Amino acid sequence: MNQIDARGYSCPEPVLMTKQALKKYGVPLQVLVDGETPLENVTRLATNGGYKVSHREVDGDYEITIS
């Protein structure tokens, strides 16, 4: 599974990184973010694109899996 690390970036950068990675790698894709705002925004992007999304919290960060 391809993974991108968007931790440390403020919005809209994690969304733009996710959008580019989906075009380049497709699914499944794992996105790492470090806050609730990028979690919500990346989830919204993927959901609106017709993808299935799940996430889990790991050490204060979030792993978003898009399939």
Image: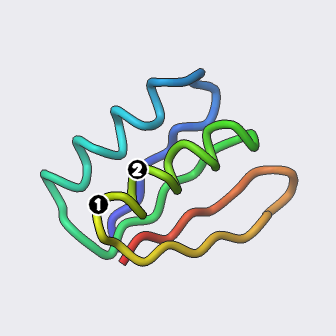
Which mark identifies residue 36?
A: none
Mark 1: which amino acid? Gly
Name the residue located 23 percent from the left edge and 55 percent from the top edge. 22
Q: How far is the residue under mark 2 from the one under mark 1?
A: 6 Å
Most extreme residue toward the left is 24
Indicate the secondary structure of the residue bearing disc 2: helix
The location of residue 44, given as percent across then percent down, is 49, 52
User: Is residue 3 toward the left or the right of residue 24 in the image?
Assistant: right
Quadrant of the rendered image containing residue 37: top right
Category of crowding for the residue at label 2, using alpha-carbon neighbours closer than 10 angstroms: few (below 14), some (14–19), many (at least 20)? some
Quadrant location of the C terminus in the rendered image: bottom left
Category of crowding for the residue at label 1, using alpha-carbon neighbours closer than 10 angstroms: few (below 14), some (14–19), many (at least 20)? few
Mark 2: which amino acid? Leu
The location of residue 53, given as percent across then percent down, is 50, 72
Which mark identifies residue 45?
A: 2
User: Is residue 33 toward the left or the right of residue 65 in the image?
Assistant: right
Name the residue located 29 percent from the left edge and 60 percent from the top edge. 49
Say which residue label 1 marks: 49
Dots 2 and 1: beta carbons under 8 Å? yes
